[in-house]
Image (cartoon, rainbow, N blue to C red):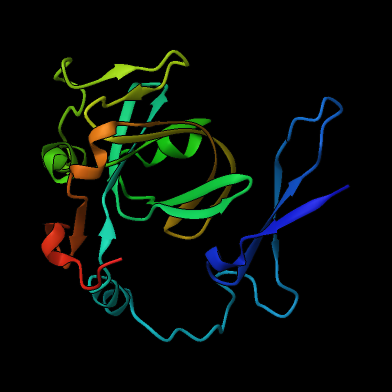
């Protein structure tokens, strides 16, 4: 029996990704992926395509959209790498898939795009220093050996982050200036104190903490 997860909601320039999930002989789920285009959509960067927004207008609009702050770490040929992102999205819970994007101009772009596994760290306000560190270009983000370690599987990670998810890359969508990477989550670490730590949020080029005072409706 074959099943597919359609993640067209993550479509960039009308490109759609189908993740194929066949069952292996021993009953474990194996995931492969292919990238396709919708039949009624032009290829990315097609000549004559209408462009509604400039890059500046697009960026200005998305600065008004708050995003949870996360750090992505991986290993590269030159050693451990890390970057701060607000582009983490949950794709599905079954199978457990998430995705994130990275601009090709980022100093870590080559290493991230060629890595096979990642650790995503969801940050609280107490990890603001890590968010700033991994967002600063030209610094050694792993110089302080007391701040990071390695998982038994080898990936570098920051133990202070309250939530960490390790996963394997199963697909990658490259556009002209960025890549969207789809990851199969394989392991999660959730610290007990994460519920009391205000989540770290980035909005309009500023850092914010979500506290009980920001809650509008009691659940």
Considering every residue shown, the one lying at the far front of the view is: 219
49, 101: nearer the viewer: 101
Q: State the image coordinates of residue 34 (x, y, percent, origin top left).
A: 71, 50
Q: How many circles with numbers are drawn on the protein? A: 0
Residue depicted at x 13% and y 58%? 208
Q: Locate residue 121, reporting x and y percent.
A: 32, 38
Q: Is residue 17 left or right of residue 103?
A: right
Residue 14 located left or right of residue 161: right
At x 18% / y 43%, what residue is drawn? 197
Is residue 115 visible in the rendered image? The answer is no
Q: Is residue 190 above or below residue 199?
A: above
Q: Indicate whether 105 appears above or below 158.
A: below
Q: Residue at x 43, y 50 (%)?
A: 100
**Front in this rendered view, residue 117 or 152:** 152
Q: Quadrant of residue 35?
A: bottom right
Residue 147 pos. (x, y %): 18, 22
User: In terms of depth relative to the viewer, which is nearer, 151 or 27?
Assistant: 27
For residue 67, which quarter of the picture? bottom left
Most foreground residue, 91 or 44 = 91
Residue name at image x 34 percent, y 22 percent: 156
Which corner quadrant holds the C terminus? bottom left
Any part of residue 170 in sight: yes
**Against 83, is 149 above or below?**
above
């Amino acid at each position: 029996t074959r099943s597919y997860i359609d993640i067209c909601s993550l479509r960039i320039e009308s490109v759609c990704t189908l993740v194929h999930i066949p069952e292996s002989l021993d009953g474990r789920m194996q995931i492969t992926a292919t990238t396709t285009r919708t039949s009624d959509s032009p290829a990315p960067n097609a000549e004559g395509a209408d462009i509604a927004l400039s890059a500046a207008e697009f960026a200005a609009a998305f600065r008004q959209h708050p995003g949870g702050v996360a750090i992505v770490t991986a290993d590269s040929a030159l050693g451990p790498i890390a970057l701060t992102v607000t582009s983490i999205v949950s794709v599905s819970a079954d199978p457990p898939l998430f995705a994130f994007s990275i601009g090709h101009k980022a100093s870590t772009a080559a290493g991230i795009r060629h890595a096979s596994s990642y650790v995503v760290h969801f940050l609280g306000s107490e990890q603001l220093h890590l968010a700033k560190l991994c967002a600063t270009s030209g610094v050694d983000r792993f110089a302080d050996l007391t701040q990071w370690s390695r998982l038994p599987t080898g990936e570098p990670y920051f133990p202070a982050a309250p939530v960490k998810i390790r996963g394997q890359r199963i697909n990658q969508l490259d556009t002209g200036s960025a890549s969207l990477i789809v990851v199969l989550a394989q392991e999660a670490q959730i610290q007990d104190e994460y519920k009391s730590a205000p989540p770290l949020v980035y909005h309009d080029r500023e850092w914010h903490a979500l506290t009980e005072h920001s809650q509008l409706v009691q659940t």
